[in-house]
Image: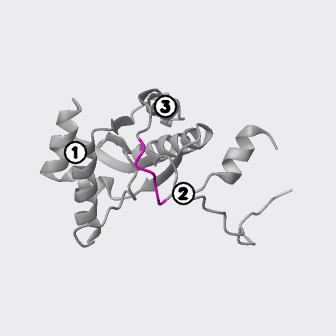
Amino acid sequence: MNEVMDALVNRRSVRKYKAEAVPEELVKEIVEAGLYAPSGMGYQKPVIVAVTDKETRDELSDLNRKAGGWKEGFDPFYGAPVVISVLTPKDWDKGVEDGSLAIGQMLLAAHALGLGGCWIHRAKEVFETEEGKEILKKAGLEGEYLGIGNLVIGYADQQPKAAPRKAGRAFFIK
C-alpha cells in the first residue's frame, strides 16, 4: 500500500494527548496542508486560525464545553495542546464543504507528521459568541465568519484501532 493510502486507512481520531508542545514548524506544515485543500471554484475561501497559546486554547475549550452542555472541568479538546479552527465567510454557500475538506486534509497531514488529531464540532456555536469573536479579533480576523470545525492536534497518548468497516456501504455501477 502506498503512503497516501496507508494514511487514509490507518489515521484514527485521537482523544488523549500528551502535554508535550508541538513544534511551530509542524503546526505550520499542517496549516499549509489545509490551505492546499480543494475549494469550490478554486476561490480558497476558508480561513484557518491556529492556537498554540495555552490561555487562548483553554478559553476555546471552555467555550466549546459550554456549547456542548458539559460540566465544568471537562475538556472537549482531550488535552491536545494545539487547536486549529477553520472558518469560512458566512455568505459563501460552499463553506461547509470547503472547510470540511481543509480539516480532513489537515488531519491527514498531522498523521503523516507523527501527530494525533481529532475533529471537534461546535466551532459554529463558539464563534457566534462575543467571546469567540474576540478570539478571532485577537488573531487579526474580523468580519462575518461561520465556524466549520476545530482540529485538535498533539502527540497521541493512545493508539486507537479502526473498527471493522460496515458492509453494504459501497455500490458500483458497471
Separation of disc 1 and disc 3 at Cα?
Answer: 20 Å
Which residue lies under the disc numbered 3? 26
89 within the magenta span: no
Q: Could you say which disc has been placed on residue 13 in the image?
A: 2
| Other-residue count near label 3 (Cα within 10 Å), few / some / many at <14 / 14–19 / ≥20 | some
Front position in the image: 173 or 67: 67
- The mark that comes first in sequence, 3 or 2, is 2
Q: Residue furthest right?
A: 174
Q: Can you tell which of label 3 and label 2 is closer to the viewer?
A: 3
Which residue lies under the disc numbered 1? 55
Q: Amino acid at mark 3?
A: Leu
Q: Amino acid at mark 2?
A: Ser
Residue 142 visible? The answer is no
Q: Amino acid at mark 1?
A: Glu
Residue 150 picture location, percent across and down:
38, 49
* Quadrant occupied by the C terminus: bottom right
Q: Which residues are magenta?
A: 15-20
Q: Secondary structure at mark 3?
A: helix
Tag 3 and tag 2, C-beta contact below 8 Å:
no
- Magenta region, main secondary structure: loop
Q: Kindly identify the residue that appears in the image at 40 percent across and 59 percent down.
A: 78
Q: Secondary structure at mark 2?
A: loop
